[in-house]
């Protein structure tokens, strides 16, 4: 994999204190990238991640941000670009904990809120980052879900809203390619980290449901945050320089 040592600017990871965001930020740092990241409220985890990034010899900067606030998102992005003399990669790994519910039990207000958190939040930060990505001829990688390809029951709040993010990725790829900007998405399957871990811990997924899920995965095991990080960093690297507008499921074959 071609690293990021020669690139000016930084990678911006949204949701850096989440299970996936942390793994992604650390792998970018290992590949030679300076890392800025946003988080919602976990300042202790943000401080620990910054120390870990700096221990790898890279610069780090963290900032709390509600991405649904377009003005706040733009202010944060512009500040990061100024601090690091540019942004060469945007990785959108932010997202709220999403409960598993049947569509019939989801209220219109609840669905609207999920759409704002997922799709509008992504659009706000991507829109603000575009001028910097055009300058660096950089790329966007959005972390979505494998459930947009094979729907697991009770996952509408995740797959329905992240599906909107994937369509924005396609639109950015088509419209921004003339400026040298690439856009792709990664679809995590069932993992031992991140949101899947929270669902297990909360009891949303019973032992029986987990057993069924594992049987539906050809590799017969769950993935890890590192699996997602590897795919994300690859898509952002020069090794994937002719890949744009694509969705890569990292799911052990679940979606095939």
Image (spheres, rainbow, N blue to C red):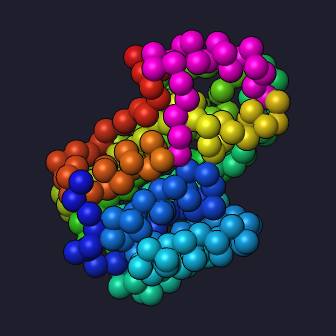
Image coordinates of residue 119 in percent, x first then y, are 56, 47
Where residue 249 sits, quadrant-wise, is top left
- In the image, residue 131 sits, relative to residue 166, either above or below, namely below
Pick the quarter of the image with the C terminus. top left
Q: Would you say residue 130 is visible in this rendering?
A: no
Residue at image coords 73%, 41%: 198
Q: Residue at x 35, y 42 (%)?
A: 170
The answer to whether residue 184 shows anywhere in this view is: yes
Magenta-tinted stretch = 204-225
Who's the residue at 56% across and 59% down the image? 22
Q: Position of residue 67 (x, y in %)?
A: 61, 62
Tell me where residue 182 sits by quadrant.
bottom left
Specify whether residue 145 is painted magenta: no
Q: Nearer the viewer, residue 241 or 239?
A: 239
Give the percent coordinates (x, y) of residue 61: 53, 79
Residue at the farthest front position: 55
Count of numbered marks: 0
Image side of residue 41 versus residue 172, left or right: right
Q: Position of residue 24 (x, y in %)?
A: 47, 56
Above or below 70: residue 82 = below
At x 31% / y 55%, what residue is drawn? Answer: 236
Q: Nearer the viewer, residue 69 or 14?
A: 14
Q: Is residue 224 magenta?
A: yes
Q: Quadrant of residue 178?
A: bottom left
Horizontal side, residue 225 vs residue 233: left or right: right
Relative horizontal placement of residue 112, taking residue 71 as reference (left or right): right
Which part of the image, by quadrant, shows the N terminus? bottom left
């Amino acid at each position: 994999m071609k690293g990021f040592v020669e690139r000016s600017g930084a990678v911006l990871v949204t949701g850096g204190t989440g299970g996936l965001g942390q793994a992604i930020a650390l792998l970018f740092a290992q590949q030679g990238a300076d890392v800025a990241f946003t988080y919602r409220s976990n300042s202790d985890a943000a401080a620990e991640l910054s120390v870990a990034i700096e221990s790898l010899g890279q610069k780090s900067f963290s900032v709390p941000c509600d991405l649904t606030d377009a003005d706040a998102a733009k202010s944060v992005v512009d500040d990061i670009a100024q601090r690091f003399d540019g942004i060469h990669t945007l990785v959108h790994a932010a997202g709220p904990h999403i409960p598993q519910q049947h569509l019939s039990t989801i209220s219109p207000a609840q669905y609207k809120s999920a759409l704002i958190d997922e799709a509008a939040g992504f659009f706000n930060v991507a829109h603000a980052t575009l001028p910097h990505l055009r300058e660096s001829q950089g790329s966007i990688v959005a972390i979505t879900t494998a459930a947009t390809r094979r729907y697991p029951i009770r996952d509408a709040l995740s797959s329905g809203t992240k599906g909107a993010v994937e369509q924005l990725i396609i639109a950015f790829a088509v419209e921004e390619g003339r400026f040298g900007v690439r856009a792709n998405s990664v679809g995590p399957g069932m993992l031992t980290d991140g949101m899947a871990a929270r669902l297990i811990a909360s009891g949303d997924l019973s032992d029986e449901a987990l057993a069924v899920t594992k049987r539906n995965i050809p590799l017969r095991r769950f993935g890890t945050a590192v699996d997602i990080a590897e795919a994300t960093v690859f898509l952002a690297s020069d090794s994937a320089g002719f890949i744009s507008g694509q969705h890569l499921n990292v799911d052990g074959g679940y979606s095939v």
